[in-house]
Amino acid sequence: MRIMPPVEAYNEDLFRDVLKAFDNLEERANEKANEFFNNYPGDEHTDPGDAAGWAGDHSYSWWETMVSLRQSMVNLMAAGLYHLIEQQLAALSADCAYDRVADTNLEKLKTWYRTNLGIDLTSIPAWSRIHELRLVANSVKHAEGGSAKQLRELRPDLFSNPAFAQIREEMEAQGLSNRFLDRQTPLSVPLAGDGLFVTEDDLQTYAAHARSLFEGIVEFCEAHRDDHFPLAH
């Protein structure tokens, strides 16, 4: 199936290779601190303790920036995967001997598949995750809005910063309120890696369900190979 390789690339190669640039951030932050300290242009009046503090601030700022960039990249890749699915669904229609779908909008794609092939894409088990991915993609692009509101109801965990996970667990264990950590604020800058926290596991899940979606289409076509298409004609 010619459309599968790009979808497979997300699950098998692309996001792993891209995210390798963000491996070992803590270790690299320590190296940044040491480099800053060793190269600080001090003199006999410079307090080494002050220089060490500035080095720590420098390395933490670098680490925080890289964590945000990494999250931004994961969010972007989730949005990219969704639009790849839309484009691949449209491209698949080009294999038909009649008019291909003229739009990559998912609602129009659903109509085309149902009208011409009799496939209800929403009946394929993978569809629920594709719907979730659509909400993720819209939230990444548009920040707060209808999709973010729906996604918050469906997957509230995607709006919880994983950096606070340990703190949240410790507070819960002590019976302390974590209202500050879990307060609901409008989604503002997901493209900067803030407010929306798609994980690598989420990416793998979305990619696996994208594959299942296309496999479901293939299975349907094989089961109806003797039918007369397009149904609309």
Image: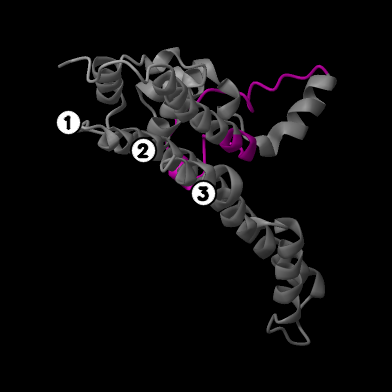
The label number, if any, that marks residue 99 in the structure image = 1
- Amino acid type at image mark 3: Met
- For residue 134, which quarter of the picture? top left
* Rendered residue at 60%/46% (across/down): 12
Type of amino acid under label 2: Gln
User: Where 180 sits versus 86, above or below?
Assistant: above
Q: CA distance from mark 1 to mark 2?
A: 16 Å
Quadrant of the snapshot with the C terminus:
top left
Vertical arrangement, residue 50 with respect to residue 199, above or below: below
Sequence-wise, the earlier of marks 1 and 2 is: 2
Can you tell which of label 2 and label 3 is closer to the viewer? 2
Q: Position of residue 32 (x, y in %)?
A: 70, 69
Asked if the residue at tag 2 contacts the one at tag 1, i.e. Cβ–Cβ closer than 8 Å, the answer is no
**Pointer 2 or 3: first along the chain:** 3
Instruction: Give the residue drawn at x 52%, y 16%.
Output: 125
Find the distance from the CA under tag 2 to the CA under tag 3. 22 Å
- First in residue order: circle 1 vs circle 3: 3
Residue 201's x, y, as percent? 64, 35
Q: Looking at the image, which is closer to me, 16 or 136? A: 16
Q: Nearer the viewer, residue 34 or 232?
A: 232
As helix, strand or loop, the secondary structure at mark 3 comes to helix
Horizontal arrangement in the rendering, residue 156 relative to residue 163 (left or right): left
